[in-house]
Image (tube, helix red, strand yellow):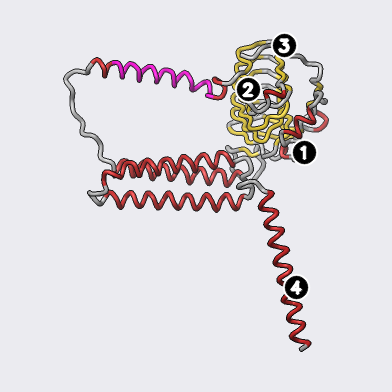
Amino acid sequence: MKHAAMLERLSNLHRSRLQQYAARRSDSDAASPAFESVRSFLDHFSDSKRSIEAELARCRALASDPASAPNLKPELENVSASIADLDRLVAENSYFLPSYDVRSSLKAISELKEALDSANSELVPRKKFSFKNKASKKDQCILVKQIEEIKVVDAEKSNPVGVRDSPGFRNKENAVLVKCFRVSEEGEGDFSLSDLNSCEVYLKGRIRALFVHRLRNCRIFAGPVQGSILIEDVNDCLFMLASHQIRIHQARATDFYLRVRSRPIIEDSSGVRFAPYRLFYKGIDEDMKDSGLGEETGNWANVDDFKWLRAVQSPNWCLIPEEEHVGTTNASDREEQCDDE
């Protein structure tokens, strides 16, 4: 009887521990946003990849059945949409994924796209080529329109969509530019800095996203960005930035003072240095807290160089020695001096 009572107590204790573990696990899952676990994201990615591969195999099976051939093109279009969704999923969650997992996911997506292109070329019949004696007036108009569209695309290659469409400061030289974002404007739009030379820029308040393109010898001081910052083609500049995600392309001889939730990413860059964020203006603590950037994560020092895959330290970036840090920049007295365009 004593032995049976002891076993009963042990069994009850074991059940109690299992219940406590399940409760803690449930609370943890409820507190974490979707895919805040790398493993959960990779599991979802693998399932989606296998599903797309199965759909491609089914399309090849449809091609062998003449009765199902008319449905082949819509099925391949659905596969293309699924690949695009998977590509978007990686982009939206790359801020917390290790660089290796980002690269391997993008490589898997590239292989899926190649498999889709191969299936399209093999399975979808091409229209038979035929000569036409004379192009109609309508065809000539379409051709002219296509040429004009090509010209527009070529012109836009040097000016990304975000930079081109959003409000911002553009084509300025030797200017002090200040923009204050009011409470009513928070999170409502993006802002751009483009083609600036020897300018000093102050952005106070919260904005949704920041695009930076073609800056030379500039000093940029910005409050919290609630989304992402994309920087392209900057030389001999200084940035003080706070954001959830920062991507830097084609930067040369530039210092970055950052507060960032995820690891900063650099690509095709050299001579870039990093240090902690040192900007102050009246109300910045509240702006930081409301943007989810109230706490220092230390990620300013954890930089991923996508063009350096070796295990040793990338030669393209380093930390700024503490004795070379600039002092805290106080932008409290800065007033708007230039309207955005």
How far is mark 2 from mark 4, CA to CA?
58 Å
CB of mark 2 within 8 Å of CB of mark 4?
no
Q: Position of residue 297 (x, y in %)?
A: 75, 40
Residue 120 falls in which quadrant of the image?
Answer: top left
- Packing grade of label 2 (10 A; few <14, some 14-19, many >=20) is many
Q: Amino acid at mark 4?
A: Leu
Q: Nearer the viewer, mark 4 or mark 1?
A: 4
Q: What span is colored magenta in the figure?
A: 141-161
Q: Amino acid at mark 2?
A: Phe
Of marks 2 and 4, which one's residue comes earlier in the chain?
4
Of marks 2 and 3, which one's residue comes earlier in the chain?
2
How far is mark 2 from mark 1, CA to CA?
24 Å
CB of mark 4 within 8 Å of CB of mark 1?
no
The numbered dot on residue 295 is: 1
Q: Amino acid at mark 1?
A: Glu
Of marks 4 and 1, which one's residue comes earlier in the chain?
4
How far is mark 2 from mark 3, CA to CA?
16 Å
Residue 4 falls in which quadrant of the image?
Answer: bottom right
Of marks 1 and 3, which one's residue comes earlier in the chain?
1
Determine the secondary structure under disc 4: helix
- Name the residue at 68% across, 29% down: 225
Viewer-nearest residue: 334 or 233:
334
Q: Amino acid at mark 3?
A: Gln
Viewer-nearest residue: 147 or 29:
29
Determine the secondary structure under disc 3: loop
**Left or right of 333 in this view: 160:** left
Viewer-nearest residue: 151 or 162:
162
